[in-house]
Image (cartoon, grey):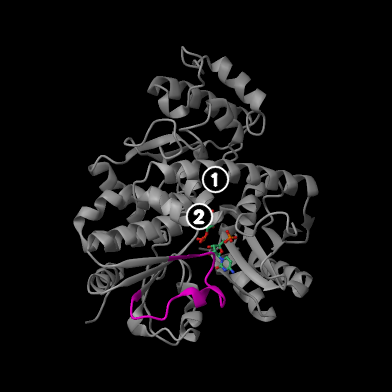
Amino acid sequence: MIRMGFNDDVTAAAERIAAAEEVTIISHIDADGITSEAILAEAVQRAGIPATTHYIRQLDPLTIRTVPEDRSLKVFVDLGAGQQNLLEERGLTVDEVLIADHHVAQPATLPYQQVNGVPYGHTRLSAAGVAYLIAKEMDRKNTDLASVAVVGNVGDMMARETLGLTGIARTIVDDGVANGSIRATARDLNCYGTSTRPIHVCLSYNDDPLLPGISNDINGSLRFLQKVGVPLKTRDGRWRVWEELEPDEKRAITSALVQQLLAHGEPVDRLFAETYVFPNEAARTPLRNASEFATVLNACGRWARPLVGSAICRGDRGTQYREAEYMLNNHRTIIRELLTYIIETGVTELSHLQYLHVGDRFPDTIVGIGAGMALSKLNWRKPILIMCTLPDDPTLTKVSMRTNEWAVRQGVDLQAVLTAASATIGGAGGGHPIAAGAFIPHDVEEEFVYCVNRLLGEQFAVPDQNHR
Ligand code: C5P
Ligand code: C5P
């Protein structure tokens, strides 16, 4: 049968899974990977098919060996598209592989079946969105997993540039709104922590947009809010969170923020975004909205407990959730330390790049997150590259890069840069235009950094050609 488009690919994948006798899901340890796995594992289990899960940090020559040699259908989610050559090398046949991904695909000899929005122009649909569409195609009852898919999409920053989910990912929000599991609010405050942080803390952490006199200044933030006059505490003395403010109170604060931005000649458009609250979750917990839920999952995954995150996506609010809360605290502390380390140590600036090496001080699973957070506090015009050593393989260096929408509009594509630069020195890289990573031999770090700088220079020089 000839398949014509993305929807046909989704249908074909659903049919393939439904016909399988046994399924192995291989997924990635971040929020998008965990939500993708949870959605598929739940759908497969509901269909009465035995399923096993393998979580991996990255699909590479070492981790590919954990993929079992058996007769199960191997479903690669949130990874695989960019590493099809590895699947071939592992000897995996077309008959046993299905890829559900959103990373840029690399050419392969074998025509593995794939569901990926990117080649069809659906670039703001993460793997969790793809997994959800497959699950929904398997059984309409799986639309109860819409909120999990929204967490994956938001966790992978699919809503960032457009200030809300768009396209196919937005239709998943509609499913959740229809079944009452998602409350979508248009033009809400674009700020992280609206369900758990005191409002002045929330605003002081905001860097998109940077709020003059408020961002990075918790006292300034408190003074600003006190002047607006909205009660910041409840009657019993607890700090209120943004989500529990009345609409007129929210308006009073956002109007004052608009004035503040205008007074400093700053644009106000990024102050507002569509937000996704889960009304069935307990108030003032990090599971209450999509972006905070995603952090919980990242904390689980990046600290080697992705199955805890998966259990939470599938409904656990008991022992697994308590364990996740503990990891979330730890995750936050280490990321704060990493951010402070980057700012205090400083970066080396080249013509088109800023970089630093954190040695073995921080794990490779979080250095990219820290680099992304540090960028707005550094020279945001230059992409940042962060390196660290891999404790389990001292011959390798992990590289993470982050940039911003502005640079991507100038033609920067970190995925292309890292793929090309790694290829020349025997490393392996991939990811997205705005966020990418690689593993490289540790003895070519300097040469690698200069190569990346040169490639970035070429991309900055021809914006029209690369414009996306
Ligand atoms: O997709 P990959 O795992 O698997 O990327 C995850 C990392 O890349 C996260 O840190 C996320 O913040 C970042 N990312 C991003 N913008 C995108 C896609 C990913 O910042 N469009
Ligand atoms: O590890 P980090 O968060 O920096 O990863 C950013 C993006 O780069 C992710 O999408 C990840 O899947 C991708 N990546 C990759 N190959 C690597 C390392 C990271 O494709 N060797």
Q: Secondary structure at mark 1?
A: helix
Q: Is residue 411 visible?
A: no
| Rendering quarter of residue 60 | bottom right
**Which x, y percent locates residue 104?**
48, 70
Q: Secondary structure at mark 2?
A: loop
Judge left or right: residue 310 versus residue 4: right
Q: Residues within 10 Å of mark 2 (few under 14, many from 20)?
A: some
Q: Above or below — where is 22 with respect to 202?
A: below
Q: Which mark is residue 97?
A: none
Q: Is residue 106 visible?
A: yes
Judge left or right: residue 21 versus residue 125: left
Judge left or right: residue 399 versus residue 447: left
Q: Above or below — where is 199 with respect to 433?
A: above
**Which x, y percent locates residue 299?**
53, 49
How far separated are the C-alphas under marks 2 and 1?
9 Å
Q: Farthest residue to the front: give it.
A: 319
Residue drawn at x 42%, y 59% as measured from the top left:
126
Q: Which residue is mark 2?
A: 305
Q: Please say if the residues under marks 2 and 1 sit with CB atoms less than 8 Å apart.
A: yes
Disc 2 residue type (three-letter): Arg
Quadrant of the snapshot with the N terminus:
bottom left
Most common secondary structure along the magenta stretch: loop
Q: Earlier in the sequence, mark 2 or mark 1?
A: 2
Q: Which mark is residue 327?
A: 1
Q: Residues within 10 Å of mark 1 (few under 14, many from 20)?
A: many
**Which x, y percent locates residue 142?**
24, 55
| Rendering quarter of residue 384 | bottom right
Span colored in magenta: 54-73
Disc 1 residue type (three-letter): Met
